[in-house]
Amino acid sequence: MARLRYKKPKSSSFSTTPAIYPERKTIKALNDLKSKIPQRIEKGELFFLLEMAQILRKRIQDTAPDVQVGENMIDYAKDLKIAIAAGWQDVGPVCVYFENAEVELTVDRLGETALFFRRTSASPEWVDVLIKYGPWPAEMVPVEVKNTDAKIIARKARPDELQALANRIYFRRQEIEGLLARAGAKNPRVEITENGVGVVVKEDVGYNVLRKEFGFDGEKQEAHWRPALRMLREEAKMVWKKFDRYVMNGRANIFDLPDNYGEISKTKFSEGEPFQKELAPFS
């Protein structure tokens, strides 16, 4: 950005209009401001997003119902976190999110749960077969899966959904059992089993929240994200004014920032895309 230069005042006996020249200190102050503006804009964008996330989280915490995690109903909103997605150029997205809770799968939940398998760095080859043919009804897991073998995500499902999954898998049972055996799985069986009992799964809390938000699967509808997102549009006007003032004066304390926020990987941020997609029309 070009710097302003001081010019010595000149007088003219032919002009009837007085000339006004800035003083040296004025020129210096303007140049200082111009040099700081790009950095302040970048920081101001981050502060803007963080305060917006703070407003959204507080509104959700004030209005959210309890949701099912494992066999319990919990106040999930009290544990909502704020983080910046790492690995993005310039200012990355700021998100409000909930860590999927780890619960032990019980025999009572097998008949109402679908399982999704994800690889880890230590996954054996046969995990790829589970991924390819998933999701799986929890009562039809064809092999014993240790928690070191795969990351397992649990989602509550309707009986008709689980039956459709079971029919699809059972129809290809010989193919699946053969692939599992060749990939090193011990005694794979595509049938009703209790292989899922006792495994530690990550509950898909986001899906359970959407069931409440939209009244899916017989849940009583208790919308709280959509009203909060609509409210955020009005709040943005106020926070944007703070951004403008910050660019001019550099005082970050005009923003109401969260006391604690962290950073999440781009991969983890992307895991929330299904949740974001459902709510995007209302933001």
Image: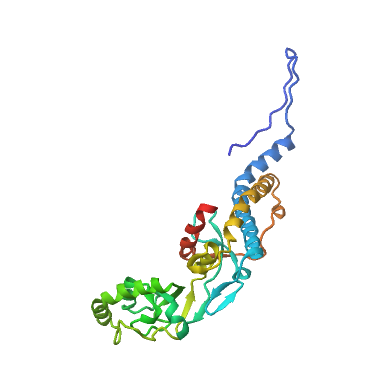
Q: Is residue 58 left or right of residue 198?
A: right
Which x, y percent locates residue 69?
Answer: 54, 75
Of residues 281 and 132, the one nearer the viewer is 281
Q: Is residue 40 left or right of residue 149?
A: right
Q: Is residue 268 left or right of residue 75?
A: left
Which x, y percent locates residue 230?
Answer: 60, 52
> Is residue 90 something one can see in this rendering?
no
Residue at 47 percent across and 84 percent down: it is 108
Is residue 264 shown above or below 193?
above
Which x, y percent locates residue 105?
Answer: 47, 82
Q: Is residue 162 left or right of residue 31?
A: left
Quadrant placement of the N terminus: top right
> Is residue 77 something one can see in this rendering?
yes
Quarter of the image where one finds residue 2: top right
Residue at 24 percent across and 76 percent down: it is 175
Of residues 213 and 283, the one nearer the viewer is 213
Quarter of the image where one finds residue 82: bottom right
Is residue 244 shown above or below 206?
above
Which x, y percent locates residue 103?
Answer: 51, 80
Total count of labels: 0
Is residue 276 shown above or below 80?
above
Is residue 175 shown above or below 206?
below
Question: What colouring does the structure picture have?
Answer: rainbow
> Most extreme residue toward the top, as rendered?
14
Residue at 67 percent across and 59 percent down: it is 257
